[in-house]
Image (cartoon, helix red, strand yellow):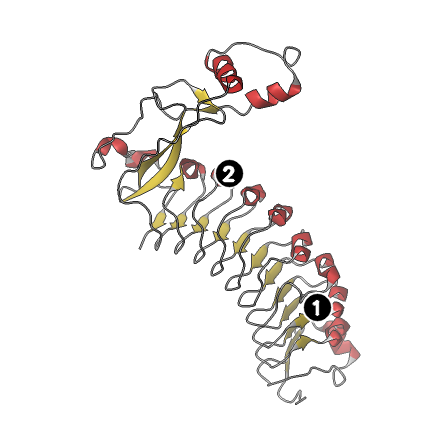
Amino acid sequence: METHEGAVATGDGVLDFSRLNLDTFSTDSISEERKRDTKQLYLNYNRLASLPSSVSFFCNLAFLDISNNGLTTICDGITRLTKLKTLVAKNNRLDEFSLPKEFGSLHLEVLNFSGNRFEEIPLQCMKLLRLQSLSLGGNRLKSIPAEIENLTSLELLYLGGNLITAIPPEVANLPYLSYLVLCDNRIQSVPPQLTRLYSLRSLSLHNNLLTYLPREILSLVHLQELSLRGNPLVVRFVKEMTYDPPSLLELAGRTIKSRNIPYSPSDLPSNLLLYLDLASKCPNPKCAGVYFDSCVRQIKFVDFCGKYRLPLMHYLCSPECTSPCSSNPQSDAESEDESSVPADRLQRVLLG
């Protein structure tokens, strides 16, 4: 059925063909002037199986909503919409094979593919360098590609409701990311590199498989909301003494760093200079040691906002290092004071 009866056209550049039960879309009845003046086009809640190439006639289009159709493909014509900033294509039947090859040439700032059938994030999307908001919630994603780091303008990344098992450290290379939504997945751990997300304000991790958080999460100075409900966070103090003896290289490096032995670029090969730069300081305030690859992992409870006690992973330089936390799971000595997490750093911790 093809009908444009009931379409709404306003004088502010908006053309609304939503909820008209369309299975095809023709622009024959639309004047050239109207096509040129249209900035927003609504085709949502119809029965379109593919995005028609006729959308390319709207040369000044900045906003396109094609949600809630039966779309399985998006036509090549969309790549001619050089002024398109927002594409909303929620709740269709799109997958990683549905996009045109040159989709990455668009100047999109907002892209919403939630509620589709993507098993992978299309690599074309990783070329949208102006993208500020990317939503792929409610799909079938199993992973996040390392190329996500290319989207350096990204402020919001919504990947909730998928099958993701891990967070790649490359996510930490998104300098403006403020909202990261990874709820309702199968994530078991959070990479400590996320501490580099200096702009992060909200982190949604509820309904995953987390048992601890990296200690570095305390360094997210702008984080205001952390959602953790529905995770098997440990309820007792857990200490894992898995420890590989340090290599001779590491022992030498520890000696140089802990004793502050001076050296210069002319003293050592470049690979050893790089290795020495990777030294991590033992978090035990009573220990002045460092470590490189060999360390002891421990889980320590930290009080957030004076109410919630969360297990954070931290690392000790050796089994002989005196742990700064008590082995008694009920002892106050194992928890940091409320004052250690300023209220302006973390305002909401959602556990239930």
Residue 342 visible here: no
In the image, residue 45 lies at what x, y percent? 57, 79
Classify residue 310 by image quadrant: top left
Q: With 128 as the anchor, is 334 left or right in this view?
A: left
Provide the residue designation for mark 1.
61
Look at the picture and state if 300 lies above or below 89: above
In the image, residue 172 lies at what x, y percent? 54, 42
Amino acid under disc 2: Gln
Q: Residue at x 64, y 73 (%)?
A: 72
In the image, residue 305 lies at what x, y percent? 31, 43
Q: With 62 as the anchor, is 326 left or right in this view?
A: left
N-terminal of the two: label 2 or label 1? 1
**Residue mark closest to the camera, 2 vs 1:** 2
Tell me the tag on residue 12: none
Quadrant, the N terminus: bottom right
Amino acid under disc 1: Leu
Provide the residue designation for mark 2.
193
Residue 86 visible here: yes
Secondary structure type for disc 2: helix
Residue placed most toward the observer, 110 or 15: 110
What crowding class fits label 2: few (fewer than 14 Cα within 10 Å), some (14-19), or many (20 or more)? some
Q: Residue at x 28, y 38 (%)?
A: 237
State the separation of the CA atoms marked 2 and 1.
Answer: 39 Å
Residue placed most toward the observer, 33 or 97: 97
Secondary structure type for disc 1: loop
Residue placed most toward the observer, 78 or 329: 329
Q: With 256 as the anchor, is 106 left or right in this view?
A: right
